[in-house]
Amino acid sequence: MKAGIVVFPGSNCDRDCFHVLRDVVKIDVAYIWHKSTSVGEIDLVVLPGGFSYGDYLRCGAIARFSPVMEAVERHARLGRPVLGICNGFQILLEVGLLPGAMLRNKSLRFVCKHVHLKTENARSMFTTRLEPGEILKIPIAHGEGGYFCDERTLEELEANNQIAFRYVSETGELGDEFNPNGSLRHIAGVLNKEGNVLGMMPHPERSSEQILGCEDGRKIWDSILEAYR
């Protein structure tokens, strides 16, 4: 398996993802520059966190027009995995590979802390190493992470089991006090209908080694690897 990490002007989690994939998960990985028109011989495409193009206009609104995004769309339409983390999730929403949009955090402040996630879909290629309902501890770092969509889309997400993760308490309880950004129905991660595209605001690359205090994020990388065995 080989992964490619797209680098936009303003990306700042690309090296974190590269380190985890190369040195922790131990797979081949390469950077893909945003002006590239092809992702090459890549299995997994990762859109990392950061502030692509300075987050001008809206987060991800300019990055969606980068030449590489046409190649990423083709990759996704072929059923190959695409993972968007934080700013990467925002870009996937802007380009239309996932439904919905992002709003400013309800607090109107940048939030950087560990949160707890409940696994809602344990059958996707990103979650096969997780149990249904399993609680993960993974950090967030964003100012525009309030997931929003219209009521019809929300019901479709629920009906199609496209909600991958929700913000919860350490013991799995739902509540506004555990929702760090005001996301509708506490949504932290969304899948496309086919299950090969995942967008999530929390950063699994920042919780994949014990030296960082938690290894829960590694289960997401290991799930992807398992899907290719």
Image (cartoon, rainbow, N blue to C red):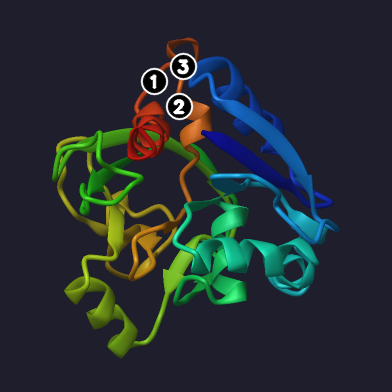
Q: Left or right: where does residue 106 sit relative to residue 87?
A: left
Name the residue at the top extreme.
211
Dot 3: few (<14), some (14–19), or many (≥20) neighbours within 10 Å?
some
Residue under the image location 15 percent in, 38 percent down: 131
- Element assignment for label 2: helix
Label 3 or label 1, whichever comes before in sequence order: 3
Q: Which amino acid does label 3 sit on?
A: Glu
Nearest to the observer: residue 37 or residue 151: 37
Residue pointed to by mark 2: 207
Residue pointed to by mark 1: 214
- Residue 119: image location, x then y, percent: 23, 46
Label 2 or label 1, whichever comes before in sequence order: 2
Residue under the image location 52 percent in, 63 percent down: 76
Q: Left or right: where does residue 107 sit relative to residue 72?
A: left
Circles 3 and 1, Cβ within 8 Å, touching? The answer is no
- Residue 57: image location, x then y, percent: 76, 74
Q: Left or right: where does residue 156 sit relative to residue 148?
A: left
The residues tagged by marks 2 and 1 sit, at their Cα atoms, a distance apart of 5 Å
- Residue 70 in view of the camera: yes
Q: Which mark is residue 209?
A: 3
- Element assignment for label 1: loop
Dot 2: few (<14), some (14–19), or many (≥20) neighbours within 10 Å?
many
- Residue 91 in view of the camera: no
The relative height of residue 199 versus residue 133 in the rendered view (above or below) is below
Dot 1: few (<14), some (14–19), or many (≥20) neighbours within 10 Å?
some
Q: Nearer the viewer, mark 3 or mark 1?
A: 3
- Residue 62: image location, x then y, percent: 77, 70
Q: Left or right: where does residue 172 sit relative to residue 35?
A: left
